[in-house]
Image (cartoon, rainbow, N blue to C red):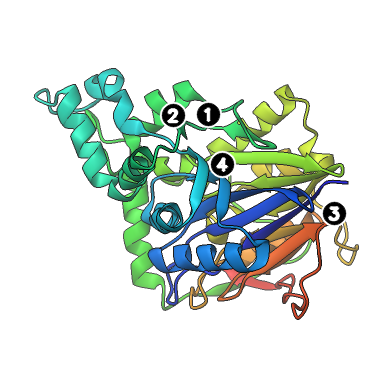
């Protein structure tokens, strides 16, 4: 019977979180290997060493860059340089400059100049594409409906990516009109830096969930590739840094493909390292079902957050509580590798990861 294991490697030694995930599925002697985001250059090297040591191979069948942020794309170049790769899946926003030029304020911007600016500002992702081309590795774009190995892409779809997300990338030239989302994001980022060291807490009970519904994250995060598969009737969901809009779209796409994520999901990646700007009560209910009415029921599924060891607010306690209420057991990398598998060989010497408990005091 086919098995699967997914591993979340630590990224960064300071406060800044990132994602570096490797996984394999199949049967002994016939495994397929995937890398989903590579984190920093250092975590990219960790991925190479980990795959060689624990998977016994120097080949990656599928490489996926969820979105162009450096803390997701940089390490993938290390994997490309040191290992053979079958397919690279990544978005290439610079290829759509003809279609989006008219969204920008500067009338002198041409298709060629816009493409060049996107390539320059998304240097890590663009370098990844160029390196793959130099090595003769095919590059595909992961839009909703595509199949990457056994994983179905649930979001984003092509039209939304090109016409709604790319024009709002912070890394793109200025839009014709400043969007409210962009202004709010900048204000929130500035405020976050000021209060990071002075977090206050409020009480929270099991029956009360105060995740705001109107949260917004960057367009880059919303462009994250959401993947889903089922092995042994258990579902596995990778979300990158997806926000509530993309998670809703993913739930809609899952229904179209006949996936019952609410009932089947067994392991989920907590979006964006556990940020409260990426989830809401409505979205979590849509993906994972309603909250358990009482505390203390056994956890039947698992959720993992990639969080830097010294990150003071990743994952947010409010977000951890929200997943616990929906029957998840929560772990965070925090400087260590988190592995989960079914039907896979054991890993001698590895121990159970610490579990994050429900908190009665959460960040205000």
CB contact under 8 Å: marks 1 and 3: no
- Please give the residue where the numbered disc 4 appears in the rendered image: 244
Q: CA distance from mark 3 to mark 4?
A: 21 Å
Q: Position of residue 15 (x, y in %)?
A: 43, 73
With respect to residue 267, does 214 lie above or below? Answer: above
CB contact under 8 Å: marks 3 and 2: no
* Mark earlier in primary sequence (4, 2): 2
- Please give the residue where the numbered disc 1 appears in the rendered image: 143
Q: Is residue 352 left or right of residue 275?
A: right
CB contact under 8 Å: marks 4 and 2: no
* Mark earlier in primary sequence (3, 4): 4
**Disc 4 residue crowd, few under 14, some 14–19, many 20+, Cα 10 Å:** many
Q: Given this view, does label 1 or label 3 mark the residue nearer the observer?
A: 1
Q: CA distance from mark 2 to mark 1?
A: 8 Å
- Please give the residue where the numbered disc 2 appears in the rendered image: 161
**Disc 3 residue crowd, few under 14, some 14–19, many 20+, Cα 10 Å:** some
CB contact under 8 Å: marks 2 and 1: yes
CB contact under 8 Å: marks 1 and 4: no
Instruction: Decide which of 105, 342 is in the foreground and name it.
Output: 342
Q: Given this view, does label 1 or label 4 mark the residue nearer the observer?
A: 1
* Mark earlier in primary sequence (3, 2): 2
- Please give the residue where the numbered disc 3 appears in the rendered image: 292
Q: Is residue 223 left or right of residue 61?
A: left
Q: Position of residue 320 (x, y in %)?
A: 67, 63
Image label count: 4
SS for tag 1? Answer: loop
């Amino acid at each position: 019977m086919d098995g699967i294991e997914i591993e979340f490697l630590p990224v960064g030694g300071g406060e800044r979180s990132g994602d570096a995930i490797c996984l394999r599925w199949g049967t002994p002697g016939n495994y397929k290997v995937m890398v989903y985001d590579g984190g920093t250059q250092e975590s990219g090297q960790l991925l190479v060493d980990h795959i060689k040591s624990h998977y016994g191979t120097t080949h990656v069948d599928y490489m996926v860059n969820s979105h162009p942020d450096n803390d997701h794309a940089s390490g993938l170049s290390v994997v490309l340089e040191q290992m053979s790769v079958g397919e690279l899946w990544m978005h290439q926003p610079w290829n759509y400059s003809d279609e989006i030029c008219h969204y920008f304020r500067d009338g002198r911007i041409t298709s060629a100049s816009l493409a060049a600016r996107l390539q320059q500002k998304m240097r890590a992702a663009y370098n990844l594409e160029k390196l793959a081309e130099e090595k003769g590795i095919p590059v595909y774009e992961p839009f909703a409906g595509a199949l990457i190995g056994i994983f179905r892409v649930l979001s984003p779809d092509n039209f939304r990516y090109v016409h709604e997300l790319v024009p709002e990338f912070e890394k793109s030239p200025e839009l014709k009109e400043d969007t409210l989302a962009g202004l709010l994001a900048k204000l929130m980022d500035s405020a976050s830096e000021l209060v990071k060291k002075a977090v206050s807490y409020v009480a929270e009970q099991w029956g009360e969930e105060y995740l705001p519904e109107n949260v917004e994250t960057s367009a880059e995060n919303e462009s994250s590739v959401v993947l889903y598969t089922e092995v042994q009737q258990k579902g596995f969901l990778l979300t990158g840094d997806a926000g509530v809009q993309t998670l809703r779209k993913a739930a809609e796409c899952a229904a179209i493909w006949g996936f019952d994520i609410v009932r089947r999901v067994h392991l989920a990646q907590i979006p964006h390292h556990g940020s409260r700007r990426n989830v809401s009560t409505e979205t979590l209910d849509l993906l994972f079902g309603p909250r358990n009415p009482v505390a203390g029921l056994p956890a039947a599924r698992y959720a993992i957050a990639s969080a830097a060891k010294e990150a003071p607010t990743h994952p947010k306690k409010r977000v951890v509580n929200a997943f616990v209420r929906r029957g998840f057991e929560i772990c965070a990398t925090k400087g260590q590798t988190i592995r989960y598998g079914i039907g896979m060989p054991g890993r001698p010497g590895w121990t159970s990861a610490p579990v994050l408990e429900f908190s009665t005091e959460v960040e205000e």
